[in-house]
Amino acid sequence: MLMLAASLLACGAPPVAQDADASTTLPGKDTIALPVGCGPAGELYRCDPIDNAGCAGARGEACDVDPTHGFGCYPSPNNVTLGGDCNVDEGPSCAPGLSCATDSSADGTCAKFCCMDADCAANQRCAATDPTFGTLGVCK
């Protein structure tokens, strides 16, 4: 998981866990499984970065990599759209379903989370961040 966290850097603010109806902040519930093959079988997370399940999207929360728990809900604002400039340390942060894809600095570009090539545009492929974790990556 550490390799995944290092490769897909998360939004700047600390994550918060939400219950299913997103009305109450919880101390941490890992109840979401990634699609089969996308991540380790049987592992549960606080949210799904592909579809933002587990986060309060209506309140602007976005699921992204959380080095402590795998994935966590980050509070708003998370409003940078696909292809927009982002910064994992200071913001701005990417909208739900996107991650700030970086190379070696905190600056990056918002890219779509994916589990397979079919999740990406016709001219892109799903580049797995850490193949030992699963196929989860971003469209490139």
Image (tube, grey):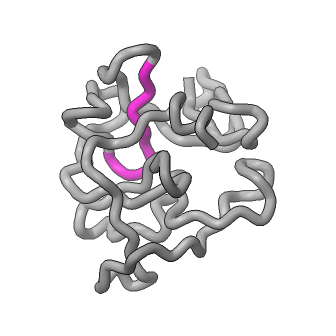
Residue at (53%, 38%) from the top-left corner? 5
Residue 55: horizontal and vertical position, in percent?
39, 67
Specify whether 119 is left or right of 6: right
Q: Is residue 100 magenta?
A: yes
Q: In screen coordinates, is 81 left or right of 137? A: left
Look at the image and tell me whether residue 135 can be seen: yes
Q: Quadrant of the C terminus?
A: top right
Q: Seen from this angle, which residue lies furthest top?
A: 104
Pick the residue in front: 10 or 37. Answer: 10
Residue 139, horizontal then vertical, whole percent: 56, 30
Task: Report which quarter residue 24 is drawn in.
Answer: bottom left
Magenta region:
95-102
Task: Judge left or right: residue 106 versus residue 92.
Answer: right
Q: Quadrant of residue 114?
A: top right
Residue 64 is situated, as x and y percent measured from the top left of the image, at 44, 49
* Number of numbered markers: 0
- Residue plotted at (68% across, 32% down): 130
Q: What residue is shown at x 80% (from left), y 59% (from top)? A: 41
Which quadrant of the rendered structure holds the N terminus?
top right
For residue 58: magenta?
no
Residue 117 sits above or below residue 96 on the image: above
Between 128 and 58, the residue placed more toward the observer is 128
Q: Is residue 119 visible?
A: no
Q: Which of the 4 image quarters holds residue 63? A: bottom left
Name the spot of residue 90 as percent of width and height, x first. 20, 34
In screen coordinates, is 105 left or right of 35? left
At 28% from the left and 29% from the top, the residue drawn is: 86
